[in-house]
Image (cartoon, grey):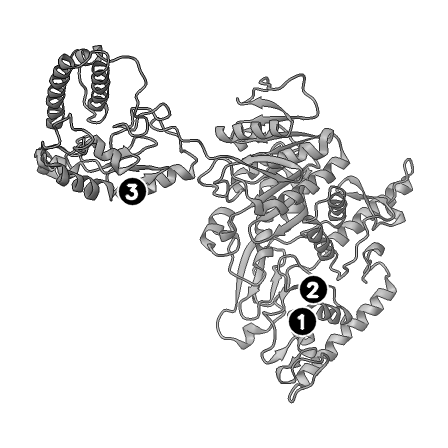
Amino acid sequence: MAAAEAALQWLNEQKENEEKQDENHNHDGAGEAAALNGGVVSEKVKNSLDVKISKSELESEEKGTKEEPTRESESSILDASAHYPRDKHISIQRHLADLEKLADLREVSHNTHLCVTDKKKPCPLCPEEKFKACYSHKLRRHLQNLHWKVSVEFKGYRMCICHLPCHPVKPNLFGDQCRVPQGLSKLGAHYHCIICAATIARRTDMVGHITRHVNKGETESRFITVRAPASEVVKESATDVQVLPNHSTPQKTDSYFNPKMKLNRQLIFCALAVLAEERKPIECLDAFGATGIMGLQWAKHLRSSVKVTINDCNEKSVAIIKENCHLNKMKVKLNLKEGDNDGTVGDGEENTDTIEVTKMDANVIMHLRSFDFIHLDPFGTSVNYLDSAFRNVRNLGIVSLTSTDVSSLYAKAQHVALRHYGCTIVRTEYYRELAARIVLAAVTRAAARCNKGIEVLLAVALEHFVLVVVRVLRGPSNADNSAKKIQYLIHCQWCEERIFQKEGNMVEENPYQPLPCDCHGSMPGRTAVLLGPLWSGSLFNTGFLRRMLLEAVQYGLDEAQPLLKTLVCEAECTTSKRFSTHGDENKQEECGVYIKTSNTSAESCVVPGKRKGEELRGKAAKRQRAEHSAEHPAFYYNVHRHSIRGMNMPKLNKFLNYLSEAGYRVSRTHFDPMGVRTNAPLAQFKTVLMKYSTPTYTGGQTEGPVHLPGEDHGGGEAAAAADPKEEDAEFSEDDPCAESHPAHCAAD
């Protein structure tokens, strides 16, 4: 308050000088300038010193002022202009000169009529107890060193440190020191936030506070008019969406958009397009909309085949989804309340281009309404929404879920996987397929609790996500059949061999007996661990994947086509690389739905009205289930993991041909670029790899069988590997349907 009193005293002296000048000079010229100076000073007293002065004390000053714009816009005392309001704190300034003007540090040459430069002046940001009034040169050094150099910069403004008693100090922190006025001024150093007007004591905390505002997109304040960060328009699959500059940080933005998930969105779109061909129209739900790009792609390309509902529980995300719908010329039907479907925004009646946008919790909307297609893509694990997803999903509908908690699924945080999924896992060479089977086990248990079974259509595990697409089969019998496929896995930690535990409740005398390896007999101690429970069934449906490939070609989804081709080969366990998207199309029953595939027989065609046709259809369905159960071997082997030291292994494609010639089913896998999916045991896998490897000293120029000294055992194993080939050949001659490969998927 001492600084305020000094300012008022200086104000009175200034008014006396102005009155003397008015008597000696013309009232038209000098009187107007004096009134203007009085107006500027009054604003300085009210704003710079942040002191409440009664209206009666300032009436005499305001009477002489006229309603004119201030001449000093950028160089005014408080940097007050039309664009920046005058209620910001005095510690927030643009330049050091503005801070000096706040203390009235002016040159004598420019202000010869003001004889105040020789007087001592107080610091406007410090109380008199901390810094006493001093001359101009000392006050200038004080402002520069103790206020300006330790300031925090934001958008061209500097938030200088303030020592005025405006920061609340808790009396119980330092005991009796808070009772002393000097201690109070010493403990009151703080910064004023330019955005939210908060007072923060430490500079590092202030920097972090401003950074959090920027990450959340909060750059507007009541002190300065800062424009919000310009939103950029991102185009993907002929769909435009507006995103914020910080859209890649999901924890700090309301419009999370990840460009790396484009492949994931294309796969989900292909699955929805296949379902739209089976029945029309279908109701689909994007439970976590964010920017709404996925639902917009569904509505824009599939049109009248789908009725899209985009949901998000965040109000800002709902506003962004609404803007993106208008950007893509889609009408919006808003439903902001639970159980209320009357709120409609848009011109005209509801048509095929209308998207329903809801603001609810994902569990609530899935409990209230039924859908044919549900996609779950939360931040992290999706186990919290599985029960709600399977509660009201329609029969033969599809549920797809994307799990991004790869740290727990890929065995980097094993305790988190045990907490979320109830599975015991370790880091293995096939950890990505293990992650997909963990998610499928959780999905199966959630569906079984609702008396529903599942059929796995697609399971993809890549670097950033794990995608699972399943078809829902209603009925307790389907739920029981699906629950039986959840088994434990026996994994040898020495040789990486693995096998699913047999069904049954009886305790085995030797738990290592199911393993094909003999590591337990040759190694001391325990050599194997029990992993799971996991999904032990098939991960792919060949017919569904082929139809997804056709949809990807039709809509021009270039990034999804190579992956879908790899998945088809992996599902059939073949090394074919040439695909034909056109061919003979017959009807084949797949989970009660008649679909179009090219790998069918005449027996699968339905003859209506005849008992014989029903019997043939039942036999074809049974045989198809048997083929699907053994469609592809479980898990895969990494070639580099089992390579022989000192030997150059053959090229991967040639090695696949060698295994195929040995009589085993073999294919590459999308889980691992150097992985090989085969039904060969690990011992035979190593035998073939050893047979066609070359020593390093030969330079690896030739590839073929090599016999090193003391390799009689390897030759015996190679001969033993040739026997199954002959047996399989004889078996294939007896039963031509044992290994059926599609005609349009032949090799080059």
Q: In the figure, is residue 471 to the left or right of 139?
A: right
Q: Which residue is under mark 3?
A: 205
Viewer-side label of 2, 3: 3
Give the amino acid at mark 3.
Answer: Asp
Q: Callout 3: 10 Å neighbours few (<14), some, many (20+)?
A: few
Where does residue 711 sit, x and y in percent of width and height? 66, 85
The residue lying toward the viewer, choosing from 136 and 718, is: 136
Q: Quadrant of residue 402?
A: top right
Considering only order in the chain, which callout, 2 or 1, is on the residue closer to the N terminus? Answer: 2
Residue type at mark 2?
Answer: Thr
**Element assignment for label 3:** helix
Which label belongs to residue 324? Answer: none
The total of numbered circles placed on residues is: 3
Question: Does the rendering let one see residue 390?
Answer: no
Indicate which disc, 2 or 3, sits on the residue closer to the N terminus: 3
Residue kind at label 1, given as amino acid type: Phe
Q: CA distance from mark 2 to mark 3?
A: 57 Å
C-beta proximity under 8 Å, tags 1 and 3: no
The answer to which quarter of the image holds residue 267 is: top right
Mark 1 element type = helix
Relative height, residue 41 to residue 270 (above, below): above
The answer to which image quadrant residue 586 occupies is top right
Q: Residue at x 82, y 59 (%)?
A: 746
Residue at horizontal 75 percent and vertical 31 percent from the top: 280
Q: Which label belongs to residue 678? A: 2
Q: Is residue 627 above or below residue 270?
A: below
Spatial CA span between label 1 and label 2: 9 Å
Give the residue at mark 1.
Answer: 685
Q: Are marks 1 and 2 in contact (CB under 8 Å)?
A: yes
Query: At 9% from the left edge and 38% from the top edge, which residue is drawn?
Result: 177
Q: Nearer the viewer, residue 320 or 37?
A: 37
